[in-house]
Amino acid sequence: MGILEARGITKRFGGLTAVNDLSFKVDKGEIFGIIGPNGSGKTTVFNMISRFFPITAGEIYFNDKRIDALPAHEICKIGIGRTFQVVKPLRRMTVQENVMAGAFLRTSNINKARNKAAEIIKFCNLDGYRSRVAKGLPIPLRKRLEIARALATEPELLLLDETCAGLNPKESEAAIDLIRRIRDTGVTIIIIEHIMKVMMGISDRILAINFGKEIAMGKPQEVANHPEVIKAYLGEAYA
């Protein structure tokens, strides 16, 4: 059963077409990966889904309802959460306060928000840092905090933008474990990641794009072996 469908979505910035007539469907409960070289349009796709940018053309559906004209706060409210490639914590607030900020989407009661934050903080293995100010956290913990704040909004669909970027192998393994546990709670995930080992091990299906257009779609191994994907990453001599 599909939870999200993009139909011919296009985004132009003046004379530059960042995403070009792209269509795909994400099934409920899967981890759907999007890969592509730098500048291929991956984060722009997230920005279009979350309405961080308005789309130039095309349609986006969530649970069979068209959403591409909704403002960003409504996109979050209907159940689509996201993280950012460059983490954006509320720097002067504590870990608990950051996560509470997400929880306030669903309640105006401070005790309920605090309880929800405590639940999410524990789930994300941030218990020992709840009183730490966000700006003092190292990158791996800031990335985990970004996920925790998004989870506090109670999303049905979570967009993860380069969660493992800048992490060492052990930190990446912890991030992968968290992503799988999130999926196991019933949250559908779309993930962008440059680390192919991560994408191959975690994704149910992968969409590969280049110059804003689809070049391959399918199971991880099928996509990894696709000549157009090899060409996009390594050059024509390797395809």
Image: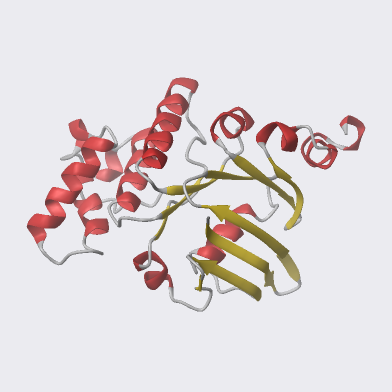
Q: Estimate the x, y position of residue 50 in percent, counting from the top left.
A: 48, 64
Closer-to-camera residue (52/186): 186
In the rendered structure, the answer to whether residue 124 lies left or right of residue 36 reads: left
Tag count: 0
Residue, x 57% and y 29% (percent of image)? Answer: 201
In the rendered structure, the answer to whether residue 23 lies left or right of residue 119 reads: right
Residue, x 70% and y 42% (percent of image)? Answer: 218
**Image quarter of residue 235:** top right
Vertical position of residue 173 compared to residue 117: above or below: above
Residue, x 43% and y 35% (percent of image)? Answer: 180
Q: Estimate the x, y position of residue 21 in percent, counting from the top left.
A: 73, 66
In the rendered structure, the answer to whether residue 122 lies left or right of residue 70 reads: left
Q: Estimate the x, y position of residue 173 in percent, counting from the top left.
A: 45, 25
Quadrant assignment for the C terminus: top right
Q: Is residue 228 visible?
A: yes
Vertical position of residue 92 compared to residue 228: above or below: below
Type of colouring: secondary structure
In the rendered structure, the answer to whether residue 236 lies left or right of residue 203 reads: right
Residue, x 47% and y 40% (percent of image)? Answer: 163
